Amino acid sequence: MTGASNPILYPETAFMGYRDKTNYEPFGDPASYNTRPVRPYNATQWAGVALGSLGILMALLHFGNELGWFALGFDLGVPASISAMMLGSLLVNSRREPVPDLAPELAAARRRWTLIVTLTVVALIGVAMIADAFLGAK
C-alpha cells in the first residue's frame, strides 16, 4: 500500500474493521445485553439451569465414554449436549432487567414499524407457501 490508502501512515483513512465496535449493534439495542437476568429466578429460569446442567452432564458422559473411562452402551452425542446447554442459557436469560427507553417519543413509531414489517414478512411467507403448494416441484 502506498499513499493515502495506507492506514498505518494515515490512520484517519483507515477502514472500519471488525475490531471497530463504536456503532456496532448486533440485535438493535446493545444496552439490553449488558443487563443481568432478573432475580429471583422463576420456574422457567430454573428449568434453564436444570437443562444447562443436564447438557454439561451429557457432554461429560459422552467424553468419558469416548475416552474409554466407562462404557455407556449408547451414544449421547455432542449436538444433543450443546443444544441442551444453549436452550438452558436461553431459558435463564428469558427475563432480563428492564432497560430505560432512551427515546420514549419514538416508541409509537417503533411499534408501528415493527407491526408493518411483521405483517409484511408473514404475508410473504404465506404467499411463498401457497405458491409452493400449487406450483412446487412434484
Image (spheres, rainbow, N blue to C red):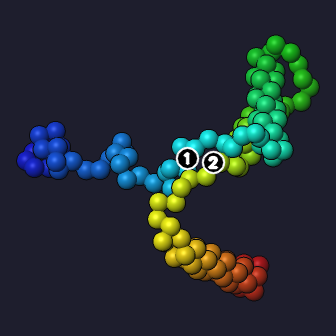
Q: Quadrant of residue 63?
A: top right
Left or right of residue 44: residue 127:
left
Residue at the far right in the pictured view: 73
Nearer to me, 80 or 56: 56
Nearer to me, 131 or 56: 56
Q: Mark 2: which amino acid?
A: Glu
Nearer to me, 31 or 8: 31
User: Residue 30: image x %, image y %?
Assistant: 49, 51
User: Residue 6: image x %, image y %?
Assistant: 15, 44
Q: Quadrant of residue 71?
A: top right
Q: Marks 1 and 2: CB-CB under 8 Å? A: no
**Residue sitting at x 45%, y 54%:** 25
Left or right of residue 77: residue 108:
left
In front: mark 1 or mark 2? 2
Q: Is residue 5 above or below residue 109?
A: above
Quadrant for the N terminus, please.
top left
Under circle 2, the secondary element is: loop
**Residue sitting at x 50%, y 50%:** 31
Mark 2 sits on what residue? 97
Under circle 1, the secondary element is: helix
Q: Is residue 1 above or below residue 66?
A: below
Quadrant for the C terminus, please.
bottom right
